Each structure stands twice: as structure tokens, then as C-alpha cells.
Amino acid sequence: QVHLEESGGGWVRPGGSLKLSCVASGPTFSNYAIGWFRQAPGREREFVAGVSWSNLRPFYEDSVKGRFAISRDNAENTAWLQMNNLKPEDTAVYYCAASGSGSIYFAASYDYWGQGTQVTVSL
């Protein structure tokens, strides 16, 4: 079992940056792919970024490519989502999740979820 806790959300003006952190509890963090998802009011949860346990290849939703970067440090049991050039459309609750199998793009593939952290991008 893996327990995840996000932090780093907040309010930022368009064009600004935030860095989200996801700290995992447990000795098997490195065995899981890590995904970041977001959910805005009235919308379904959507994939943002993901990375395998090996850090071999990250994956990004098209709208965040070139702006967001996912990373992880298995020794620290921590993953991050660096978000640059934020837009109002990025406003959502952001969740980190851990997956042992399945497609990295699909929420149903993830076994463990954090509680979420609010990101608000506005003037």
C-alpha cells in the first residue's frame, strides 16, 4: 500500500508558476508509475502527466506539453509537477496517483490517490 499527499497548490496569476509535490509513504514507491491528474468543477478528472517507476519516459497531456514537467526521486519517495506559464484553464484540483499496472493515461489504472491540492490561476 502507498499513501500519497500533495502540496504546493495555491493562487497564481496567468503566466506564473507553481511546483506541486507528492510525498509517498511506504517502501515500494519505486515499483509504481506516478500520474498527475486534475479535476475542475463540473468536469471529469483528466490526465495531466505521468512517469514510470524507472523514469525512462514521461508522458504529458497535449495542452501542458512544454509548460509542465513531471519528475520523481525514488530515494526521497517524492514526485513533483513543475507548472510554468499557467493559464486560467489550468485551474483545478490536482491529484497525484500511483499505478502498479495499466495505461498511464487512465485514472482507472491507478490504485492509490492523494487528497488533492487546489490550483487557481486568475487575475
Image (cartoon, rainbow, N blue to C red):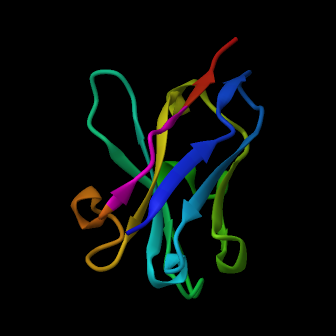
- Outermost residue, right direction? 16
Q: Quadrant of the C terminus?
A: top right
Q: Is residue 58 above or below residue 94?
A: below
Q: Is residue 45 above or below residue 123?
A: below
Taking the image as shown, residue 17 lies to the left or right of residue 2, namely right
Q: Position of residue 90 (x, y in %)?
A: 54, 33
Count up the numbered dots.
Answer: 0
Taking the image as shown, residue 29 lies to the left or right of residue 103, namely right
In this view of the protein, which residue sits in the foreground, 59 or 81? 81
In this view of the protein, which residue sits in the foreground, 76 or 38? 76
Taking the image as shown, residue 106 lies to the left or right of residue 36, namely left
Q: Is residue 76 above or below residue 3?
A: below
Residue 40 visible, this orientation? yes
Magenta-drawn segment: 112-117
Q: Position of residue 99 (x, y in %)?
A: 36, 71
Q: Residue at x 52, y 71 (%)?
A: 26
- Outermost residue, top direction? 123
Q: Position of residue 112 (x, y in %)?
A: 36, 59
Q: Is residue 81 above or below residue 87?
A: below
Please say whether residue 113 is one of the residues in the magenta stretch: yes
Q: Position of residue 117 (x, y in %)?
A: 54, 35
Residue 60 visible, this orientation? no
Taking the image as shown, residue 50 lies to the left or right of residue 105, namely right
Residue 12, by quadrant, is top right
Q: Residue at x 50, y 48 (%)?
A: 63
Please say whether residue 23 is one of the residues in the magenta stretch: no
Q: Residue at x 45, y 75 (%)?
A: 33
Q: Quadrant of the N terminus?
A: bottom left
